[in-house]
Amino acid sequence: MVKLESNWLDLRTLDELALQKTPIHQLGAGTKLGTTLAFIMVIASFSRYEVTGLIPCVFYPIVLITLGRLPYQLLLKRLLLVAPVILFIGLFNPLFDRVPVAAVGPLVVTGGWISFLSISVKLILTITAALILIATTGIHAICSTLYRLGVPQPLVVQILFMYRYIHVLLEEVLKTLQAYQLRSCHNSGIGYQAWGSLLGQLLLRTIARAQRIYQAMLCRGYDGHIILETTAARKKPDLLYFAGWLLFFSLCRLVNLPQWLGTFITGGLP
Amino acid sequence: MHMADALISPVIGGTMWAAAAGTLAYAARKVQKDGDEQKVPLMGVLGAFVFAAQMINFTIPATGSSGHIGGGVLLAILLGPHAAFLTIASILAVQALFFADGGLLALGCNIFNMGFIPCYLAYPFIYKPLTGNKPTQGRITLASVLTAVIGLQLGAFGVVLETFFSGITALPFSTFFLLMQPIHLAIGLVEGFITAAVISFVYHQAPEILQNTASGQPLGSLSIKKVFTVFLLFALITGGALSWFASSNPDGLEWSVAATTGDEELTAADEVHGFFAELQEKIAILPDYNFKPAVSEPVAAPVESGQPAAWPSVDTGTSLAGLVGSFITLLLAALIGKGLQVAAKRS
């Protein structure tokens, strides 16, 4: 129940963050979606043993978080919740890949540790990029862009419809769980005797709700077609933003900036 | 079972994206053609229901642990395969965007593992034949458990294959397979029994709901062949195109060249070719892309035997320079972040 409440709270926080009016929020949704996808593709395209080359990519989330006035804590919390499973799989790399690849003084590092580090950095970058996208854009703007880009209407309507009712259903599930807990000595999980009836009752109520919504839609003139709002065409700042980041990503991908900087500073130590 | 972007390669991610997009377009057309206006709110609200229900912990008897529901099979039973596929895709998209549960690049993989498999494989081939048009309590239970277990086993196998072919993790195929399948057998059993309990409840309380969905989506209207053709077509085209760009290791053609000439590449010594070769190496979408990382990267042995190592020799200077450079870059990033924050406050 704690997880459910906390997830609901995060959803609402992200919704509220998306309503801000910072320079990042004012950019077109398509621009931000395209930039995020390009960023994730570039990150994923780095070799499995690349760590230093990935470091300059942190500029992207840092600049966006700062300019978009996003709280670090929220992103960090999500990261901590998702990371363990991925890092668990990543931790097998040091076990299976023991080829020495780097040395720092007397310390020889194996390929497995390097690739594990690489997975960790990639994880941080890709997760924050996705969260930044939604926190600076909002689901409605993303959906209307998807529709403009040719994503089939039933899918776009489905995402919007579902998102609208997630809040209602989460509240209903929370109430049901609270009622169950109060009657079952505060058990944290649902006992097997109630598996069917608890979820089944909720399901029947949900289906009845869908019928009421359909009737309400009919009363408002629904004839099987839903008109979706579309976003305005791209403006100059959008193009500049997209091109600028694309240039930066390409630079990061083609040149290992930290290596170059380090060699310059250490004078190319033997 | 959500896959993340950190463990996936652009080739696998892109291929599965294209295949999922093609199948979604097909499913969307089918739902639209179906013309059932009531389904629009029903799909939306049921999607929200599964989204919320996934967060409920169900206590597993005699184990002290708890499990939760995935909802793919439940949606396929209630909505039919096409509408359920769209609904699951929308749930996964919202989870990826808002909860970072499964990456954006990995969305195609997740839609395949958790949407395509239960809706287009497990439901029509296991649940439908087992329950038939006149379901009974026993049949519902057996069919739900089997559908969930087999669906999840196939989904977990999908995760193993996609992760293995991405080549990011060094986990050998067999180890990863043996790690994933038994865990998902247990998860599948829990999911199956919860689904069976819910469907049985609905069967007793409001049997018309199940009858409506059963008769509304007869197997005859679902052309599995077509769905598969769409999926494979998109996967093959994209996978082929992406692999062509990504391949930097000897591919089939290079291998055959090496076999016939004894040299891995036909040498072209001129400078122009060299420049483009270097550029191509730098911009390759996936350098070191390798389908068999465990086999092709020999463990330290070559160093001892005097053979040229698979890795460039360990260079302390390069590593130190990399470390110093990375530290300075991070420091710079933090400083720029702080500077922007101050500037934003002033403006």
Image (tube, coloured by chain):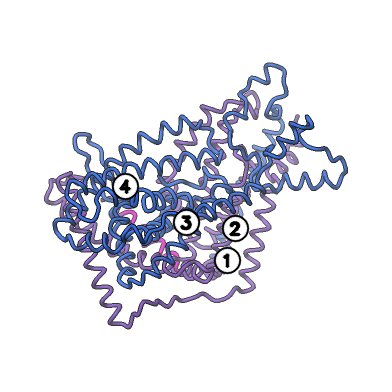
Tag 1 residue? A31
Is residue B310 located in the magenta-colored stretch of the structure?
A: no
**In the foreground, B6 or B248:** B248
The residue segment tinted magenta is A6-19
Tag 4 residue? B126
| Dominant secondary structure of the residues highlighted in magenta in the image | helix
Q: Amino acid at mark 4?
A: Ile
Residues packed near mark 4 inside 10 Å, few (<14), some (14 to 19) or many (20 plus): some
Question: Which chain does purple denote in the image?
Answer: A
Q: Amino acid at mark 1?
A: Thr
Q: Amino acid at mark 2?
A: Gly
The chain letter for the residue carrying disc 3 is: A
Alpha-carbon span between mark 2 and mark 3: 23 Å
Total tally of numbered discs in the picture: 4
Kindly identify the residue that appears in the image at 71 percent across and 40 percent down.
B253
Query: What is the secondary structure assignment of the residue under circle 1?
Result: helix
Rendered position, B177 above or below B150: above
Tag 2 residue? B339
Q: Quadrant of the C terminus of chain A?
A: top right
Give the mark, 3 or 1, whose residue is nearer the N terminus: 1
Front: mark 4 or 1 = 4
Alpha-carbon span between mark 4 and mark 2: 60 Å
Kindly identify the residue that appears in the image at 39 percent across and 77 percent down.
A225
Alpha-carbon span between mark 1 and mark 2: 25 Å
